[in-house]
Amino acid sequence: MKKTIDEIMKEPELAREPEALREIHAIRLKLYEERKGMTPAEYNAIVRQRATAFLASDYPQSPSGKRLIDKFNTGKD
């Protein structure tokens, strides 16, 4: 059974850490569990699929309304 991030955060070994660190460690442990046993090709396929879906969506915009990633794609501010 796979644990949720909230369940992982409640584990005793993370209890003494500040909440922000507990959350970071819980996310890292969850990612490790998801990726354990994957071949590099499988991992690359998943990353490529998620990146494609993210870029196809309405990804984050800055307060000025410009897309944050456009700056990196075009070299313009």
Image (cartoon, rainbow, N blue to C red):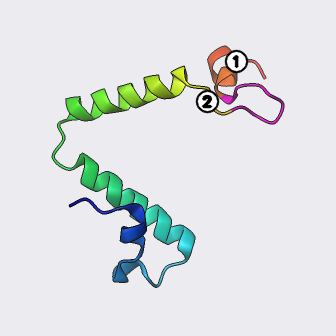
- Which corner quadrant holds the N terminus? bottom left
> Where does residue 41 sit, x and y in percent of width and height?
21, 29
Q: Secondary structure at mark 2?
A: loop
75 sits left or right of 12 in the view: right
Residue identifier under label 1: 75
> Which residue matches tag 2?
59
Q: Is residue 67 magenta?
A: yes
Coordinates of residue 3 in the picture (x, y in percent): 30, 63
Label 2 is placed on what type of residue? Tyr
- Does 7 appear above or below 66? below
Is 44 above or below relative to 75?
below
Residue located 46% across and 25% down the image: 53
- Asked if residue 71 is positioned above or below residue 24 in the image, the reply reads above
- Asked whether, in this view, residue 66 is left or right of residue 43, the answer is right
Quadrant in the picture for the C terminus: top right
Residue positioned 43% across, 67% down in the render: 6
Locate residue 30: give its quadrant. Answer: bottom left
User: Which residues, given as a range, are shown in magenta?
Assistant: 61-68
Tell me how many marks there are. 2
Residue 49's mark? none
- Specify whether residue 16 is painted magenta: no
| Residue 28 at x, y percent in the picture | 38, 58
Q: Is residue 21 above or below residue 68?
A: below
* Mark 1 or mark 2, whichever is nearer to me: 2
Most prominent secondary structure in the magenta stretch?
A: loop
Q: Nearer the viewer, residue 71 or 34?
A: 34
Considering every residue shown, the one lying at the far front of the view is 1
Local secondary structure at mark 1: loop
Q: Amino acid at mark 1?
A: Gly
